[in-house]
Image (spheres, rainbow, N blue to C red):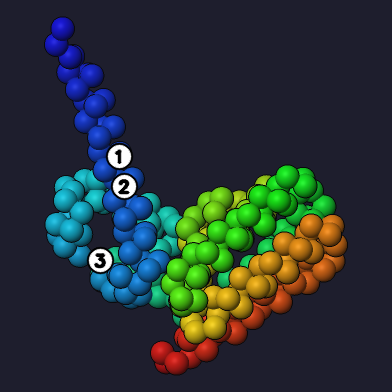
Amino acid sequence: MEKSTNDNDQELAQESRTLASSTYEGIKADIIAGELAQGSKIVESELALKYGISRGPLREAIHRLERNKLIVRIPHAGSRVVSLDIKMMEDIYNARECLEGMAARLAARFMSDEEIGSLHKLLESHAESIKQTDGKIYFQSEGDIDFHYRIAVASQNQWILDNLNTELYQLIRMCRHQTGQIPSRPNYALDQHCHIADAIGQRDEELAELLMRRHISGAWEIVRSILEEKL
């Protein structure tokens, strides 16, 4: 039996959404890794050629990146990759310190023993990843294999999770990609993560929050020095 026109239209629409989604993930990864430089102009023809995609799904992917603040549309100048200036990042890290500090406190209260064991296993896998790069890189992918995301989920506070897991999360990942490649930072950051996990395992809410806040504020000092060098 031949497919109806409506069925064909639905298949084409689904294919377009799938292409847009995969292109979104590809461009997002390039932005976070710095393959698409901050402030660089978005040239649709070049991206369409790179990803082998038509303009329709590409524009859908770009609109989604704009909603996540990774691409900004400038009047009369087109779309560009976001530029992380000092003021923007200071605001983000101040908010992050508060939110993630509280997330660590709540994680110490609510995480099950099984979840804490899983958290330690996650950090063991991170240690192995760092070792494979000779201690040069500590970059975590999204979702459950991201230590900070795992803590946010464990807080069982939807407001914290919503704020850390929207556009703020992707901007933070851009900065973490930079700090994760600074000499001595990978192992130092992993060590701090382990201390935070230990505090959570000991159900020491105050210490877990304090260690997380120190970890975030220390990361901000590194980010600020990177941004100041570019001025």
**Amino acid on which the number 3 mark rests in the picture:** Ile
Label 1, secondary structure: give it. helix
Q: Is residue 149 above or below residue 221?
A: above
- Residue holding disc 1: 18
* Marked residue nearer the N-terminal end (2 or 3): 2
**Amino acid on which the number 2 mark rests in the picture:** Ser
Residue 229 coordinates in the image, percent (x, y): 45, 92
* Marked residue nearer the N-terminal end (3 or 1): 1
**Amino acid on which the number 1 mark rests in the picture:** Thr
Using a 10 Å C-alpha cutoff, classify the residue at mark 3 as few (fewer than 14 neighbours), some (14 to 19) or many (20 or more): some
Residue shown at the point (33%, 45%) measured from the top left: 21
How many angstroms separate mark 3 from mark 1 (CA)? 21 Å
Residue 42 is labelled as 3
Using a 10 Å C-alpha cutoff, classify the residue at mark 1 as few (fewer than 14 neighbours), some (14 to 19) or many (20 or more): few
Residue 55 coordinates in the image, percent (x, y): 18, 50
Left or right: 13 with respect to 177? Answer: left
Find out whether the residues at labels 2 and 3 contact each other: C-beta distance under 8 Å.
Answer: no
Residue shown at the point (29%, 51%) measured from the top left: 23
Residue 166 coordinates in the image, percent (x, y): 53, 55
Residue 81 coordinates in the image, percent (x, y): 34, 69
Q: Choose top left, top right, bottom left or bottom right for residue 76.
A: bottom left
- Residue holding disc 2: 22
Using a 10 Å C-alpha cutoff, classify the residue at mark 2 as few (fewer than 14 neighbours), some (14 to 19) or many (20 or more): some
Residue shown at the point (55%, 80%) measured from the top left: 185
Q: Choose top left, top right, bottom left or bottom right for residue 18.
A: top left
Find out whether the residues at labels 2 and 1 contact each other: C-beta distance under 8 Å.
Answer: yes
Q: Is residue 178 above or below residue 157?
A: below
Left or right: 17 with respect to 92? Answer: left
Q: Choose top left, top right, bottom left or bottom right for residue 67.
A: bottom left
